[in-house]
Image (tube, rainbow, N blue to C red):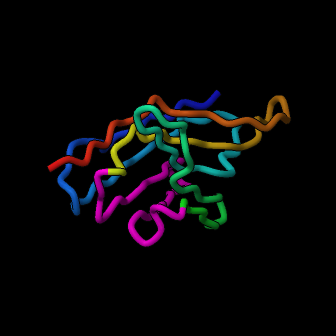
């Protein structure tokens, strides 16, 4: 069982910055991949950025050079630094993880409840 708890969303002006944090409570779960997705009103949920336990990253083209994903494996935490925010970055940001349940040997993903990021002047 995995629980993901996000924090750090809020209201910011265009060009501003935010830092999102996500802490995972994971029992017998490998947390191979952790990261972030987002969903804007009327749109499908989309990838923002992910990072493997080994440090490999994957970013959406729309956020490359502006957002940075990082993680602390010892704390089972993942972070997202959002810089140069634009109006189109407004969305609910969801923490995500994917890995193996050591008890069932099955692979699955988990989602957090989401945190709202609003970019507005």
Q: Residue furthest bottom?
A: 65
Total marks in image = 0
Magenta stretch: includes residue 35: no
Compared across the picture, whether 116 is left or right of 74 comes to left
Q: Residue at x 35, y 51 (%)?
A: 88
Instruction: Depth check: give the residue in front, 49 or 90.
Output: 90
Q: Locate residue 96, reporting x and y percent.
A: 56, 42
Q: Quadrant of the N terminus?
A: top right
Magenta stretch: includes residue 68: yes
Q: Locate residue 50, reporting x and y percent.
A: 58, 55
Q: Quadrant of residue 97?
A: top right
Q: Is residue 73 above or below residue 2?
A: below
Q: Residue at x 37, y 36 (%)?
A: 115
Q: Residue furthest front?
A: 42
Q: Residue at x 29, y 65 (%)?
A: 84
Q: Residue at x 39, y 67 (%)?
A: 66
Q: Locate residue 31, reporting x and y percent.
A: 65, 46
Q: Locate residue 28, reporting x and y percent.
A: 70, 36
Compared across the picture, whether 91 is left or right of 43 comes to left
Q: Is residue 19 above or below residue 7?
A: below
Q: Which residues are magenta?
A: 61-87
Instruction: Depth check: give the residue in front, 117 or 56.
Output: 117
């Amino acid at each position: 069982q995995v629980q993901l708890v996000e924090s750090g969303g809020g209201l910011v002006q265009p060009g501003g910055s935010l830092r999102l944090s996500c802490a995972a409570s994971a029992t017998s779960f490998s947390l191979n991949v952790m990261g972030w997705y987002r969903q804007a009103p009327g749109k499908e949920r989309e990838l923002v950025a992910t990072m493997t336990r080994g440090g490999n990253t994957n970013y959406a083209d729309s956020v490359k050079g502006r957002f940075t994903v990082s993680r602390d494996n010892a704390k089972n935490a993942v972070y997202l630094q959002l810089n140069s925010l634009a109006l189109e970055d407004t969305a609910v940001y969801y923490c995500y993880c994917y890995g193996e349940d050591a008890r069932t040997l099955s692979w699955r993903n988990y989602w957090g409840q989401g945190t709202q990021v609003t970019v507005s002047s």
